[in-house]
Image: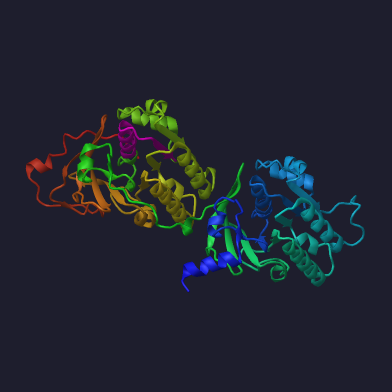
Amino acid sequence: MTDTTAADSAAKLFPKLPTGIEGFDGIAEGGLPAGRTTLVGGTAGSGKTIFAAQFLAEGIRTGEKGVFITFEESPAELSRNLASLGWDVDAWEASGAWTYVDGSPDDEATDVVGDFDLGALLARIVRAVRQTGAKRVSIDSVNALFSRLPNPEKLRAELYRISRALRELGATTLVTAERLDDYGEVSRYGIEEFVADNVILLRNTLQDERRRRTVEILKFRGTPHQRGEFPFTIVSEKGVVVLPLSAMKLTQRSSTTRVTSGIAELDEMLGGGYFRDSIILLSGATGTGKTLTVTHFVAGGVAKGDRCILFAFEESREQLIRNARSWGHDFEGMEESGLLRIIPVYPHAMPLEDHLLRMRWAIEEFKPQRVAVDSLSALERVTELRSFREFMLGLTSLLKHGEIAGMVTSTASSILGGHSITEKHISTLTDTILLLRYVEMYGELRRGLLILKMRGSPHDTTIREYTIDADGMHVGQPFHGTSGILSGNVTHARATDDEEHAGQGAQAGTETG
């Protein structure tokens, strides 16, 4: 049996209910198995309650009613907390779309007397589901029951009764449970084998003094799903948003259309310019002209009528406008024309997943033909390596699928050469790599440019000298009689008088990166 046939067979036996949670249905390959119970386990702060509530909220938006059984927070507290995510639970409750079954501790409760009565609770749940016709049920959280009932074995049996009753009613159920450790037991009291056909794990791990949330589908009994951990974040007005970075597929088209770099001599070296869907990595030490090269890239696109976004992680909008003006480019005028949007963000302002999400929303809203990111090194410093590579995978995939030309900058580790950590780990994700290097020649510091890689196209392989003045960057002739430029260990052959004095007329450049 082929993989496709097996997947089709599983889909018929166990149809899935789309959750509506952004990104999750992709890794779940359609959603949650319909009519079955799914356990969502996680440590404190991992997002269990929000996940369970969002499952109902997204259903309500598509016309499906839901029942929320709460054992921890009161309905009033829960509704107030969920309102911060843009969900008007009070209005949904008033319309009959959302129904609470309140099992939270309440000294004044009149329908629970003495020991907590799960038989009575089951009757209330079944009545609520039948009366509303709900197809989605969330139970949050079963751990509260273990602290209130003295007999764990009896509780497990009662939870199984609830799960079975909901299945007979055709409801798809989410049950949340607390874990003690992100990589420990599935649930605190070992209930997964009693109530759940499926298990989802939410994690909230501490990495380099920053929290990182991930979701993993541990098991979907009898149905396919993506394996591994996937980052997610929680944002206002949306709730949980999963970023299925490692599940992305190489299905994008390839363009043969060329676009200008904004520098005529560089276009010649590139064989006519970058490809329309190229991801360009620009690497150089501070002051070599990375931001200037980005400025040319943006200005060249605007001159051709391209819409451009510049994500700035090291300089403010005002600094970028001032720098561009010093090289003869009017970024303010480009913004007023509607062809340029500058988005400056402090790297430490949010986790990398949130940066990627907001970049994606900006790109989807503005629909640019070009995107520049200056600089990746600023982002790389605020996260750990795996998260950074996942960020780059998500960004390059987004740009590729939109056939958007993307330029990203990286700061080299030393003044005269060497690779940056950023460059080392993302070079395989890029189509074109430009190196900007300082070259020490006879007591003078000059600059050199090399096209290290360009997929799918012949290109100039010489190291060209370039200069920077009030009009920007000017690419000149190759260095002759010089070796070791890339390593920073420059050696010279015997030079002629002309070569010795070739750089004396070059003007000192403004520091640009």
**Which corner quadrant of the image does residue 218 belong to?**
bottom right
User: Is residue 297 found inside the magenta-colored segment of the image?
Assistant: yes
Q: Is residue 319 visible?
A: yes
Residue stretch in magenta: 292-312
The quarter of the picture where the C terminus appears is: top left
Q: Residue furthest bottom?
A: 1
Side of 28 where 315 appears, left or right: left
Residue 501 position in % (x across, y down): 12, 39
Seen in the picture, residue 36 relative to 22 is either above or below; the reply is below
Side of 387 where 278 appears, left or right: left
Instruction: Please report the residue visible at 28 percent of the width from the left and 40 percent of the height from the top.
Output: 261
Instruction: Please report the residue visible at 57 percent of the width from the left and 57 percent of the height from the top.
Output: 214
Count of number-bearing discs: 0
Q: Is residue 207 visible?
A: no
Residue 41 position in % (x across, y down): 66, 61
User: Is residue 210 found inside the magenta-colored segment of the image?
Assistant: no
**Which corner quadrant of the image does residue 286 belong to?**
top left
Seen in the picture, residue 336 relative to 21 is either above or below; the reply is above
Instruction: Please report the residue visible at 30 percent of the width from the left and 27 percent of the height from the top.
Output: 328
Side of 134 where 464 appears, left or right: left
Seen in the picture, residue 205 relative to 87 is either above or below; the reply is below
Question: Which color scheme does this rendered protein use?
Answer: rainbow
Residue 366 position in % (x across, y down): 45, 36
Observer-nearest of 472 and 14: 14
Observer-nearest of 165 and 383: 165
Instruction: Please report the residue visible at 49 percent of the width from the left and 69 percent of the height from the top.
Output: 5
Residue 337 position in % (x across, y down): 39, 26
